[in-house]
Image (cartoon, helix red, strand yellow):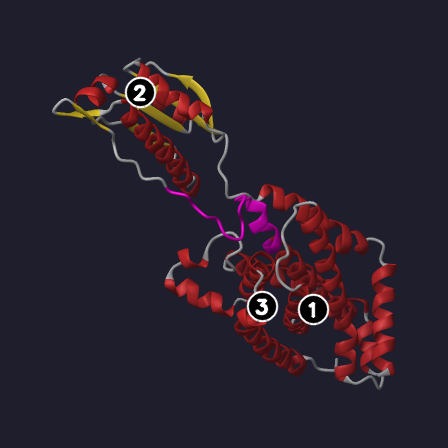
Amino acid sequence: MKTILFIIQKEFKQIFRNKGMLPIIFILPLMQLVILSNAASFEVKNIKFSYVDHDHSAASRELVSKFEASNYFNIITAFQSKKEANLEMQKGKVDVILEIPIAFESNLIKQQTTSLSVSINAIDGAAAGVSNVYITQIISGFNQSIQTKLQTYNQGIVVQPERITTIPSFWYNKTLNYKTFMVPGILVLLVTMLSLFLSSMNIVREKEVGTLEQINVTPIKKYQFIIGKLFPFWVLGLVILTVGLIIAKVIFNVPILGNIFLVYGFTAIYLILILGIGLFISNHTETQQQAMFIAWFFTVIFILMSGLFTPIESMPTWAQNITLLNPIRYFVEVIRMVMLKGAGFNDIKIQLTIIAFYAFIINGFAVWSYKKIN
């Protein structure tokens, strides 16, 4: 036990002695949490909106005013022809073109039906889909409003149009603030990247400077060396989690409805898995550049297939099956469930069991692959 404590003490001294590494470990991840949480948004705002009004009626002006009142659209200009508007869209100056036909208002009054033409720049398919939802909601609201004004008549008797009122109830995120959803996921990302990169490069650095050969000829046993090398980064991962949770609560006001010790307990086991992956990578690389490249390669795949930015349910079936092997997926699920839903141990025991099993397997391979020889 004393041997392990000496190695841990040596590792902490080595970490804090490196003045260039301290900002990377403590400052940059926190800056990333603050910046990415504000930048990574699912909302689409400042949509460049234009229209071609062939009717110039009270109804067409009211419809345009609905878009002007929206927080999602910026009215760029009104065009005289659709051809002119299309040219501006090709230049990237316009995102949406609304074309209001001739006799728009009269058709609503006489026939109670009409049509509108909406053109959306769909280079970014996701943004175009969200824009289409916004436009549909505004037009639906306008339609309901105009139908109330244009009351229908049945044999001289005024018949009020029937209206269905819906009252939505938003659970877990009543304000629909995307930061509430994104901050826990980004915190998972930072804890993972920091722990994986530092652990994967740690033993490789010993190889490069030649100290690993000196350690190998000492009577230090393999398990003592591995525990002593990885334990400091396990502690650092929990420290980063703590500071990140404080920032999430103080700056972004993210709720923590569940037991915070569940998050720490799951993170403790999760970090053992991540450090095992880092050890396995370092065992099969000779330089820090190689270790960094391999760690980054797997991290990108893990992030994109974790459900952090895109729902797993929207992925193809084969991709959903692959995500079952992705540890970040389970951590993202758990931290959101505990913090936002107030989930208990029974709710996360499946994810906890999977992560514990993966940690046992990965660390078994990592320890087996480490050879205390040159």
What's the residue at 38%, 38% (across, down)? 133
CB-based contact (under 8 Å), mark 3 and mark 2: no
The alpha-carbon separation of the residues under discs 2 and 1 comes to 62 Å
Q: Is residue 156 above or below residue 241?
A: above
- Which region of the structure is painted magenta? 166-185
Work out whether residue 17 can be spotted.
yes
Amino acid type at circle 2 is Lys
Image quarter in which the N terminus is found: bottom right
Decide: is 362 above or below 97. below
Which is more N-terminal, label 2 or label 3? 2
In percent of width and height, residue 371 lies at 71, 82
Of marks 1 and 3, which one's residue comes earlier in the chain?
1
In primary-sequence order, the first of circles 2 and 1 is: 2
Amino acid found under the numbered disc labelled 1: Glu
Of discs 3 and 2, which sits in the foreground? 3
SS at mark 1 in the image: loop
In the foreground, 153 or 221: 153
How crowded pointer 3 is (Cα within 10 Å; few <14, some 14-19, many 20+) is rated as: some
| In the image, farthest residue toward the front | 157
Secondary structure, mark 2, is helix
How packed is label 1: few (under 14 Cα within 10 Å), some, or many (20 or more)?
some
- Residue 224 appears left or right of 278: right
